[in-house]
Structures are given as C-alpha cells and as structure tokens.
Amino acid sequence: MQHSQSLKIYKFGGASVKDAAAITNLRSIVSKHGADGPLLIVVSAMGKTTNALEEIFQLAYAGQDYAALLLQLADFHRAVAQELLSATNEDAASATASNDPSLEQLVEQLGDRLATLTTGEFDKQYDQVVSFGELLATRIVASALGAQWLDCRPLLRTDHAWREGRVDWPTTERNLTTAVPPLLANGPVVTQGFLGGTASGHTTTLGREGSDYTAAIFAYCLGAESVTIWKDVAGLLNADPKIFEDTVRYPEISYQETIEMAYYGASVIHPKTIKPLAVRQIPLYVKSFVDPTAEGTKIHDCRHGLLVPAFIRKTNQCLISFESKDLTFISEENLEVIFGALAQVRLKINLMQNSAISFSVCTDFSAYRLDKLLTALREQFTIHYNTDLELYTIKNYDAASLQRLTTSRELLLEQRTRQTFQFVCRSNA
Ligand code: ASP
Ligand code: MG
C-alpha cells in the first residue's frame, strides 16, 4: 500500500460552509494551516441543505409540487458561488478542470433526477437525490479555492445498503491509493463527505452526519498523517453547550473514550469515524473554524487520568417494561423472546434492567416500531410503557456531577457502573 505520510485531511461540516462568508473563512484556514504538504478537503452540504433536499425529495416522491423549493435551493447556491467568484482572483477560478461538471450542470442533473423519480425503492432514490447537497457544495468550495474537484462516488465503494452504505474496504483502498496521490501531487483536492457508490454506479449515502466518517475512510486508505474536523465548537467538550452550561474542553482524549461518548449519544463526531483512525493510529484533531489558532482537542492513542465528567442527553426516549403474566420470574427463556422481538422490529436498546418479575428497556421512541413490538409480545407479557422521556449518561461521574443532574428530576430508572451513571426521566420541555 502506498502511504502519503505527510497527507493532511480536513473536514468541513455544513456550518463551516453555510454561506459565502463561511467559505471565505474556510479559504483563509486552508491557506494559513494547510499549506505545508498534500491536503485533501472533505466537505458536507451547505448549512441545512440536506434537510431541504430531503423535503424536496419527499414532495417529488409523493408526486407533489417541489418546483419552488428546488428553485430556492438552486438560487441559494448560485448566489453564494457568484459572491465568491467576484472575490476570487481569475487564476484560482481557472484552475478548475474543464471536464468536471459546472454548478449549472449539477443543478440540471438534480432537476432531471427529480423529474424522473419512479415509485418504489424509496431509500435508493433518496440517495440519488439527497447526495446533490455535497456535490453542489464541493463544486463551489473547489472553485473558491482553485482546488481540484474529486467525485468520490466511483472510488468510495459501498454495498447496496441505501442510506447507510457499508464500505467495501479492499476495493475502496485500491481505488483511492491509485487515483488520489497523483491528484494531490498537483495541489489540494476537494471531495464530498457522506457519499459513496455501488459497483453498478449508483450513488449511496453513509448515514446522516456521515462526512466525518468519509474523512476517516480517506485517511485510513491513504495512510494520512492526521485528520482535522473543523467545527463551530472549541474542540471535544464534556457536554453540548446548547444544552449544558459551563462546558469544559478535553485537550486530549483516547479513541476508546471518544467511541464510548459517541455510543452514549454525544453528537460530537459520527460514531463510525474513530475505528478506522484507531486501527491505523491516525490522530484526529477537533478544532474551531471560528478560532482556528486555538488548541482544540487531539484524539489519539493516549493514556490520561480520570477525565472531567461528560454529560450526554438522548431525547425522545421510551421506557418499556415487560412482566410475565403468571408472576413467574423473568427467565432466560423470556428474555430470549423479548430480545428476539426487539431485534425483529429494529428497536435498539439504550439501557436495560431486570427485576424478579419485570424487565425494562429504554429505546429511541418510534410509534411504528413500538406498535409492532406490542403486537408481537402482548399475549405473553403485560407491557407498560412511557414516552417523551430523556436518557442521561454521566461518564466518569463524581458526587458533584451526580448531584448537578439528578436533583430536581424524578428518575424512572437508574443504573451505575464504576465509570458511568445513567438514568431515565421525564422530559422537562
Ligand atoms: N450533509 C449530510 C447531513 O447533513 C452529511 C453531513 O453533514 O455529515 O447529514
Ligand atoms: Mg452536517
């Protein structure tokens, strides 16, 4: 395998490319921090574009009128491109290879896709449409930087699991190591996050917020020196500042801790991102695009003492309790039936607990899945459930952090291990 030891990978999410000013800021980050070696830039759709495309797609799929929303989306991208173009010097703009699609051609392709949607295969068609957010954003960013635009879809190979494509690692690695190093030798490369492609040439997506994962896939395959995710927060924090006050930044943290936080629901980094980086020992930096010289967080293979407690909240939870109808103990046989039914309806257990005659699970709420579960198990068990709940996790808890979160809340279920305290309570909202 060919390693590009000095290769750096930057990932810019939706907020960091949300308008012309944000892209101008991105350009200054790239010129100040990314100049000393090969650089590959992974970009997400601009701002809330993916949500807008989902809406447009749903209308089109239902045979309803989406023209106004599509025009709004196209005009938004055109206006940003125009604003950047007038501020970009000619040399940079002309560095774009002429056989790549222009912004207008991409807009046209999107229009064609929407106009020719057929019914059936909702998820497959979703991917063919929603993927345009990244295609448009990278077209604009590449032009603004005078960088090469790379369509990742023929290279980043996935299976046919639409909307959560599973990566074919050997093929992807072969493709990327062949195609990307020669491009990098000519200067920075801009490519799409979130997208992949099947062997049959269809577009797939990797799951919402999947662009972080894309950066890790490129890093793993190309043996990058590091990945930097540029965010609107100062690094990896012990809680989401939109929910909790007095957040603290971790200057460094291990892969393992980060994976666990993502598992409990911290929305900092896409959960699939860490493993490929850990396997090849590639450090991940989380830095602020608002304050690019600030230190941020380094995620790598490190040992640290006890960390500041982390607070993680999952909303829209449902607590389901099963009791055996004849008041017998909850047995392994009963549990087997319950787990089987949960797997069948694809309800993922976030927390579970059993007592003599009842067994409780906390899951993400889905009316549809819950209904299927009740139908499957109602005959055998007495089932109670509460919805509109929240699941809190305190990782590396101490007395003060426990107190801070639990006072003034009525806990419906709680559980603690040596490092982690979790509880379910009613939503305050
Ligand atoms: N644009 C996609 C989304 O909004 C992927 C990403 O942002 O990482 O989910
Ligand atoms: Mg995003």
Image (spheres, grey):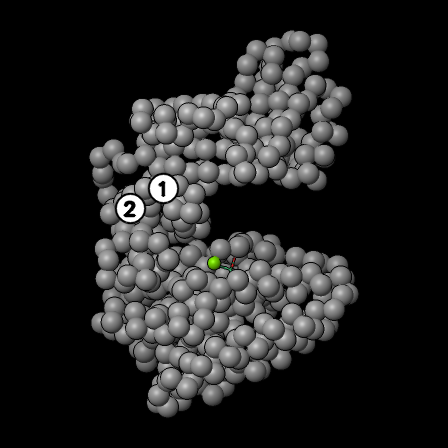
Q: Residue at x 71, y 58 (%)?
A: 121
Where, quadrant-wise, is the C terminus in this rendering?
top right
Residue position for label 2: 249
User: Where's residue 247, x and y in %?
Assistant: 32, 43
User: Would you say residue 243 is visible in this rendering?
Assistant: yes
Please name the amino acid that badge 1 sits on: Glu
Q: Residue at x 42, y 38 (%)?
A: 312
The image shows residue 387, relative to residue 8, as above or below, that is: above
Where, quadrant-wise, is the N terminus in this rendering?
bottom left
Please name the amino acid that badge 2 sits on: Arg
User: Where's residue 210, x and y in %?
Assistant: 48, 56
User: Where's residue 181, x and y in %?
Assistant: 34, 72
| Quadrant hosting residue 363 | top right
Mark 2, secondary structure of its residue: loop
Crowd tier of the residue under label 2, counting other residues whose Cα lies within 10 Å: few below 14, some 14–19, many 20 or above: some
Q: Residue 334: which numbered mark, if any?
A: none
Q: Residue at x 44, y 55 (%)?
A: 213
**Does the residue at mark 1 contact the one at mark 2 (Cβ under 8 Å)?**
no
User: Where's residue 103, x and y in %?
Assistant: 53, 80
| Quadrant hosting residue 321 | top right
Q: Residue at x 24, y 58 (%)?
A: 294
The image shows residue 315, relative to residue 112, as above or below, that is: above
Residue position for label 1: 245
| Quadrant hosting residue 254 | top left
User: Would you say residue 266 is visible in this rendering?
Assistant: no
